[in-house]
Image: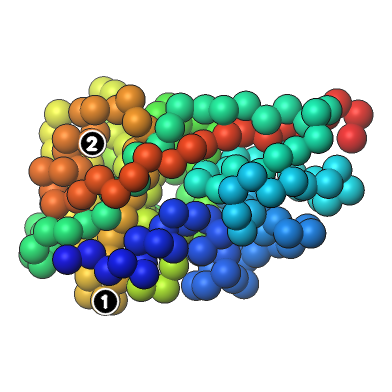
């Protein structure tokens, strides 16, 4: 059975991460906490609907994303509602140690990770996102073709993230294998794996459910853009 307290903290996952295991990476402006732009494009507030003054917003990077708790901002700031994000938490049996099959540990600032993720979800994986955890990859034909790793860390649970395969190499089981490696590593550390996936991505959700993940909720997801001239 999934831990109730953990599930409650996952209602506002970015805020929970920046106030626990990743607190040393948190930048602060008023009531907001956020990652440096080169690490991750995420900002968080302690509760949904809280108003944010323009004097605090000016400290943010030019573009940030909120997930879960969505604030109110002045009208000159552009807040765009994006498609929902389904949150899933692992609720399956102990993950057995997977086969190696060419899986390698990637350097935390390997530019190939940004190049690959820009094919699948441009803008979310940044130059230094790799410092947030372990990232594993598979190379074929001299290039990185599949990736998975760890992003948000809440202490007792860690996010499986950046799950992607280059379109030319899909259908070979690379994503499944890399996820099993990441999940195995998390469980060896006593952490519960969780992840986020687009609400419209039914194929990926089915893959994750087959691996033992359980849907917990759908989270609202917005992008905030700084006004021109600020």
Q: Residues within 10 Å of mark 2 (few under 14, many from 20)?
A: many
Query: What residue is drawn where x is 37% and y is 32%?
Result: 198
In the picture, the quarter occupied by the C terminus is top right
- Give how far across and how far down residue 171 sits, in percent: 15, 29
**Residue 218 on image: x %, y %:** 37, 40
Q: Is residue 174 visible?
A: no
Residue ID at (34%, 45%):
217
Percent x, y for residue 109?
A: 52, 53
Query: Where, quadrant-wise, is the N terminus in this rendering?
Result: bottom left
Which secondary structure, mark 1?
Answer: loop
Of the pair 103 and 195, the residue shown nearer to us: 195
What colour scheme does the image use?
A: rainbow
Q: Residue furthest front?
A: 49
Which residue was labeled with disc 2?
205
For marks 1 and 2, the one nearer the N-term is 1
Residue 107 lies left or right of residue 178; in this view the side is right
Q: Is residue 124 visible?
A: yes
Instruction: Using the rendered view, name the quadrant where residue 136 is placed.
Output: bottom left
Distance between mark 1 and mark 2 Cα atoms: 24 Å
Viewer-side residue, 78 vs 191: 78
Q: Quadrant of residue 223?
A: top right
* Residue assigned mark 1: 190
């Amino acid at each position: 059975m999934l831990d109730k307290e953990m599930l409650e903290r996952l209602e506002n996952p970015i805020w929970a991460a920046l106030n626990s295991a990743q607190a040393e990476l948190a930048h602060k402006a008023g009531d907001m906490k956020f990652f440096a732009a080169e690490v991750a494009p995420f900002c968080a507030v302690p509760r949904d609907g809280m108003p944010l003054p323009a004097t605090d917003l000016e400290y943010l990077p030019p573009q940030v994303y909120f997930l879960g708790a969505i604030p109110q901002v002045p009208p000159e700031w552009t807040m765009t509602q994006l498609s929902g994000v389904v949150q899933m938490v692992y609720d399956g049996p102990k993950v057995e140690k997977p086969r190696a099959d060419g899986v390698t540990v990637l350097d935390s600032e390997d530019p190939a990770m940004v190049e690959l993720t820009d094919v699948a979800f441009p803008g979310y994986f940044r130059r230094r996102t790799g410092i947030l955890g372990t990232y594993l990859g598979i190379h074929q034909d001299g290039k990185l073709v599949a990736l998975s790793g760890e992003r948000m860390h809440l202490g007792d649970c860690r996010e499986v993230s950046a799950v992607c395969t280059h379109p030319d190499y899909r259908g070979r089981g690379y994503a499944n294998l890399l996820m099993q490696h990441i999940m195995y590593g998390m469980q060896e550390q006593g952490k519960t794996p969780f992840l986020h996936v687009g609400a419209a991505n039914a194929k990926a959700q089915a893959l994750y459910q087959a691996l033992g993940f359980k849907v917990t909720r759908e989270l609202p997801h917005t992008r905030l853009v700084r006004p021109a001239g600020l």
